[in-house]
Amino acid sequence: MHYFSKRTSAFRAAVAFLSFLYIGRAENIYIAQTAQGTGSGADAADAKAVSFFNASGNWSSPAKVAGKIGPGDTVFLCGTISTALAVQAGGTPGNVITVLFANGAKMSAPTWNSQAAIDIGNNSYVTVDGGATGIIGGHGGNPALANGIIESIANGTGLATTNDDKGVSCHDCSNVTVKGLLFRNLYVRTAGGTDANKSGVGFLNFWNGGAGSTNITCTNNIFHDMSSGAFFDYAPSSATFEMSFCTAYNTNWGGASGDHGASSTLNGLLVHDCYFYNWQSWSSSDAGVQAALHHNGFYGWAESGGALTNVTFYNNFCGPGYTTTQASAGLFVSGNAGGILIYDNTLIADSTGTPGDGLIFVWVHNGNQTGARIYNNTMVGAGFGNGINVYSGNGPSITTYDVKNNLIVGMGTAIARFNSGDSTLIADNNLGYNLLSGQAYSNSSNASGNFMTFAQWQSAGYDAHGSSGNPNLNGSYVPQAPSAAIGSGINLSSFFTTDLAGSSRPPSPAAWDIGAYEHVSASNSAPVITTQPASQTVAAGGSVTFTVGASGTPAPTFQWQKGGANIPGATGTTFTLNNVTTADAATYTAVATNSAGSATSNSAVLTVTSTSVAPFITAQPSGQTVAMGASVTFVVAASGTPAPTYQWQKNGAVIAGSTDPTFTLNGVTSADDATYTAVATNNAGSATSNGAVLTVTSPPVITTQPASQTVAAGANVIFTVAASGTPTPAYHWQKNGAAISGATGVTLALSSVTTADAATYTAVATNSAGTATSNGAVLTVVSYWKIRHHH
């Protein structure tokens, strides 16, 4: 035993030494579509090309080699990248490989050809970070803070391609995180289309024959216009998929997780603080398409013989924007699933449609005895559909559904239970208000409705402490006194202790309010800052800690902010930054919040002493050609320390007030025809972008009309025309409306005319903006004899 102890100590020492090597050699490596400057990768101005990222020989493992991508490195993506990226190796514990979008960077292509813009493969300990400056996703997030973008620009119904594009993909891996990204237009679908077999997925984790994936995190992302925002295709021995603080709209599924086959298992599905809405673009009146596209906020299943356990949905906001055709559920769990906990969610339906199965739908049809707990959710509808639908069947044992403290308003049916012989329903302390007369509840032994009133529901043994009274909700779905929801719920603090807004629920055994939100009592007190964070100056590479304190009832929670934007995960009374850089130099504040209000601390200024770096243009504005009256936007991006300011110029002259990275002209005229540049400036210098030429097109206008002429036979004749327009028009002469071959100048010369040349001549001026036709010039040809006789 003593021998093995020595071996173990030696192994641990070797691991510690290798970790030191990784950390000591961790590098920042900059990548652009094409090499910049020296191509060393040391900064944005000298970025390496995409080919370096995709070359397997440039990745180092197991030991970090200077100048090569490897564990602990951060790869900065710069500008617009249109070539798909493939991660060639993984990180290690404590030495994650991070792919980070620099300011203004994006992955953009017409299509990714059914592949992923960033393919992590089966590599573990990898993070793809959009570089968002705060919380961009989830209900209450701020999309304006988004930075990194992954998009297709010509893929979808009726577009150039109809491929199954992906944003980021990985398989059979562990400890992969995708965060802070805006995924858009990976498959833009038109409502009513028959293209039900198209996917388009923002973040895809799939099984590729390995043992499955573990610890996969999708957080603080925005997804729109694709089939599924995030999709976790779980396999044998998969564990822990978390989707949090994400927004998904114009999707068929905001997120999904399903079993790949009979041996597939997922232990741990966590979906929280997400916002799912607007499914209309994936609707169709076609019955076959409806069957394939059942819309859901999040859909988790074990339908192929696998098993899904420990499923938790909380603090999610679903709707509105369901459709009246194939909409299925806001939150949907089905199959051999168990250990389900659904709480503190708000689900809203409106007159555009209500999910066909229910705002919350749980269908455990393999008899999983652990069943589902559905607590303290708020559901508001427009007079039809099911609030909570629990469905059982196909199982040898009895599933238990525990449904308590739910607030269902304005639905057709509050709680619907089907195949009652295969389940045990425990329902109490629920409140159903303004429900459809005669079918407020349903309890059926088969798949058909057996509707009943609230009194009949209670007589059947349910909701002995339930209510049908007015909850008196405000516009934020919070009960206001007097309310049948306040103090009418059972205490469930053994499962959770806060509401959707983060307010504390009363401790046991005090009664709770029904629904996702607790009423805020007037006796509560808003936070007061008692300890202010202090401004500090630190050298680059050092560490700094800010501290805050606040009083209030209930005890406040904290959120640190940088420059007014929330810092993800910074929710304690202290906030620490290690290995600071000049990018950390900013104003930091802490916001203390409880159910009675919030308070913001004084600003603490962090000054980082470091050598300034002159600006470098990382994204050049592009020249554009537009029609007169249109709008046009130029975009520029620059790096530098400190962050540069911008000034736009027109033909080298400053444009007053144009100091943003974007510059927009509305209703352009020919006077806007010019070369536009942007100057980025900081205290170390300035950099001027390439010139972006704006060409404003205008259709031709005839300025000189050809004149009619009478000449003797045998004479020479010249017609002349002129026209204005941008671009400069081309000309084509016509004789009696028929084009004259080769006659394309401003003049038309006819030699030795005869009576056959007598006709009406016009000139047509043409450019990309339109055409204009001159007046007709009549040529009259008379004989020489007639002229003499006339005289």
Image (spheres, rainbow, N blue to C red):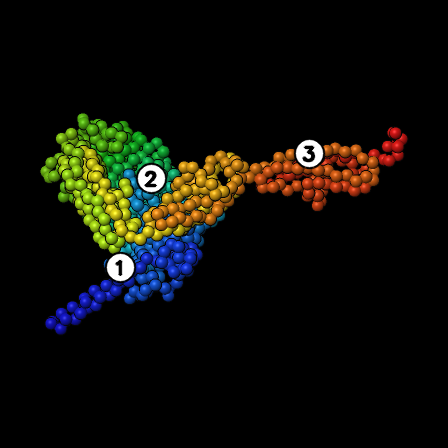
For label 1, the crowd category at 10 Å Cα-Cα, with few meaning under 14, some 14 to 19 and many 20 or more, is: some
| Side (left or right) of 491 relative to 229 | left
Which quarter of the image is occupied by the C terminus?
top right
What is the crowding at mark 2: few (fewer than 14 residues within 10 Å), some, or many (at least 20)?
A: many
Image quarter hosting the N terminus: bottom left
- The percent position of residue 252, horizontal first and vertical second, equals 36, 44
Residue at left offset 81%, top offset 37%: 755
- Label at residue 705: 3
Can you tell which mark lies on residue 282?
A: none
Mark 1 or mark 3: name the one nearer the start of the chain. 1
Secondary structure of residue under mark 3: loop
Give how far apart the Cα atoms at labels 2 and 1 are: 37 Å
Task: Answer few, some or many: residues within 10 Å of disc 3's Cα (few below 14, many 20 plus, some between 14 and 19).
Answer: some
Q: Which residue is drawn at 52% across and 40% down?
A: 673
Q: Where is residue 726 in the image (x, y as percent from the top left)?
A: 58, 40
Q: Which amino acid does label 2 sit on?
A: Tyr
Residue 740 visible, this angle: yes
Q: Which residue in the structure is indicated by mark 2?
A: 277
Q: Which amino acid does label 1 sit on?
A: Asn
Label 2, label 3: how many angstroms apart (C-alpha)?
61 Å
Q: Quadrant of residue 591?
A: top left
Mark number displayed over residue 95: 1
Tag 2 near tag 1, CB within 8 Å: no
* x 46%, y 37%: residue: 665
Q: Which of marks 2 and 1 is nearer the N terminus?
A: 1
